[in-house]
Image (spheres, grey):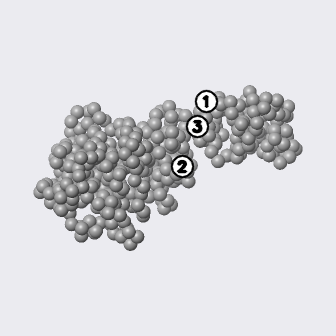
Amino acid sequence: MIKNFVEELKWRGMIQDIMPGTEEMLNKQMVAGYIGFDPTADSLGIGNMVPVMLLLHFQKAGHKPIALVGGATGMVGDPSGKSAERNLLDEATLNHNVACQKKQLEKFLDFNCGANSAEIVNNYDWFKGFSFLEFIRDVGKHITVNYMMAKDSVKSRLENGMSFTEFSYQLVQGYDFYYLWKNKNIQLQMGGSDQWGNIVTGTELIRRKSGGEAFALTTPLIKKADGTKFGKTEGGNIWLDKSKTSPYKFYQFWLNASDEDVKTYIRIFTLFTKEEIESLKQEHAKAPHLRSLQKALAKDITIRVHSETDYNAAVEASEILFGKGTADSLKNLSEDDFLSVFEGVEQFEINRTEMETGFPIIDFLTERTTIFPSKSEAKKMIQGGGVSVNKLKIDSLEFKISSEQLINNKYLLIQKGKKNYYVIKVV
């Protein structure tokens, strides 16, 4: 049964441009539509989650989603939204990146559900045997230089110059659409709003080369309320691969969204219904400090990208940092999660042989480290119950620090007061 895909996107705020006739065509029959993914990294980032969700809604509406991984276009470089030429990758690196991205896409789309099963295609498959002379004869003659120069992605770069390689990118992407229209009956291309010029070059090529008709739809580019770029932090990109961005950091990214941003994110990045989102927003408005919208968003997307186990571990790790965790939950953290949770916390290093003999707690806090400036202050804080080692409160001035207390046989966590943490690393 076909559902109204465009209507779904509208209330979610996911439509920027749409070619006339697209909605009518989609409401008549099952349609195959595709989005291209750039294989310049071996993982998708959260910026890629917008097109992933677009394909997911497309499939749920009864249509056939196609993810095109650009093994060929990755060798050329898309000028859209870029201020400089990007580095071109060799074939072995591109093949590795394509394989990794395919694996990630398979987590979100259903590849075994009959007629509208998802597919992944690689444009290298049809470009690898296409000679330059054939390309300029069969493709280049149908699109004028004037048409190409009028595109924003080209105009914005003319002042500083762009190579013929990048200038020709829109022809290469346009041919992708033509090839898929002709060979796989794909009638729709979707993408971010910065891709509109490249997408309509494809519809124009289909019209001029074969007299055919094809359609286009784009989503707005997400911008954070404070003007900073979505999907980036001070530490760099937020990746879907847990070896690049730990599930804890991934969870924290969504949990730390501003109240303004989360209202946008929850519509775009979850599958919650309109009614569910309205209910969550009302709950959030009653007690914003509980961050119920952020928690619902972070839970949903962390489970879908990683797993429920990873989500639970991320919540437990968050509670450790904010004072609710236990000594057992701290010991259960993997080394990666431990380092993620306490990234940026002041560290002290101690030689392993020193740990074997151990330290009286007061000496450790004042002489071996500088956690406290004086012994009298350290004593006062211990007696007031304000010092913990690995989340266990120290209630005796005779307590001794030793290697038996090490987490992962390498770390100690000292807490002073409610919010001050120190990591001791044994080297």
Task: Report the front residue among 290 and 364.
Answer: 364
Q: Quadrant of residue 93?
A: top left
Position in image of residue 412 (x %, y %)? 71, 36
CA neighbours of label 3 inside 10 A, class few (<14), some (14 to 19), many (20+): few
Label whose residue precedes the other's in the sequence (2 or 1):
2
Q: Amino acid at mark 3?
A: Asp
Which residue occupies 32% across, 63% down? 164
Label whose residue precedes the other's in the sequence (2 or 3):
2
Which residue occupies 17% across, 45% down? 183
Judge depth for marks 2 and 1 and give the one in front. Answer: 1
Q: Amino acid at mark 2?
A: Asn
Position in image of residue 228 (x %, y %)? 49, 59
Query: Is label 1 in a helix, a strand or a loop?
Result: loop
Q: Amino acid at mark 1?
A: Asn
Q: Residue furthest right?
A: 376
Q: Which mark is residue 336?
A: 3
Query: Is label 3 in a helix, a strand or a loop?
Result: helix
Labels 2 and 1 touching (C-beta < 8 A)? no
Q: Which mark is residue 256?
A: 2
Locate residue 68 relative to residue 212 in the image: left or right: right
Q: From the viewer's perspective, is residue 230 above or below residue 3?
A: below
Position in image of residue 333 (x %, y %)? 60, 33
Q: Is residue 30 visible?
A: yes
Which residue occupies 66% across, 40% down? 323
Q: Which mark is residue 375?
A: none
Q: Is residue 278 visible?
A: no
CA neighbours of label 1 inside 10 A, class few (<14), some (14 to 19), many (20+): some
Compute the Cα span from label 2 to label 3.
20 Å
Judge depth for marks 3 and 1 and give the one in front. Answer: 3
Q: Residue furthest bottom?
A: 159
Compute the Cα span from label 2 to label 1.
24 Å
Q: Which mark is residue 332?
A: 1
